[in-house]
Image (cartoon, helix red, strand yellow):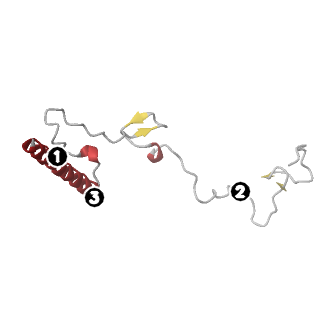
Amino acid sequence: MIEFLNSVIVDLQRKNQEQKEKLEKMAEAALNGNNPSELDNYDSHDKEPVKKKLPPRLFCDICDCFDLHDTEDCPTQTQMPDSPEHSTFHGTKGEERPYCDICEVFGHWTDSCNDDQTF
């Protein structure tokens, strides 16, 4: 009976040591930035190795294409310039241009605006 109990204790100590080694290996891998699922599991030599997930593919919503560029990097995407465009007015410099404060456009004075909308 004592021999049986001693063999059980020895077996439990061996399993305990194996678990400690696994835990140390996982802790070391976590410090190196690896996931526990990426570790080699030495208990499953007969199983297929777990395949790592591939990173997501680039996709452009504008061009509707894969692997060329991301939507944010699309070359056809136009961005607003930081400064407004230059004026195309070719009149004389001192001349006052008619401007409407209601419509906010050049071409007629506010007094002669026929826009019935109020803002």
Residue 39 locus on image (x, y percent): 22, 46
Percent across and percent down for residue 2 are: 9, 45
- The image quadrant where one finds the N terminus is top left
At which x and y percent is residue 57? 36, 39
Q: Residues under labels 2 and 1: Cα distance?
A: 92 Å
- Foreground residue among 44 and 119: 44
Badge 2, how many Cα within 10 Å: few under 14, some, many 20+?
few
Q: What residue type is labelled 1?
A: Leu
Dot 2 amino acid type? Phe
The quadrant holding residue 69 is top left
Circle nearer the viewer, 1 or 3: 1
Helix, strand or loop at label 2? It is loop
The residue indicated by pointer 1 is 12
Nearer the camera: disc 2 or disc 1 = 1
> Amino acid type of disc 3?
Leu
Q: Which of 62 and 55 is in front in this view?
A: 55
- Which element is circle 1 on? helix
Residue 89 numbered tag: 2
Label disc, if present, on residue 31 of the rendered structure: 3
Does residue 30 appear to the left or right of 97 in the view shown?
left
Label pair 2/3, CB-CB below 8 angstroms: no
Residue occupying the far front of the picture? 1
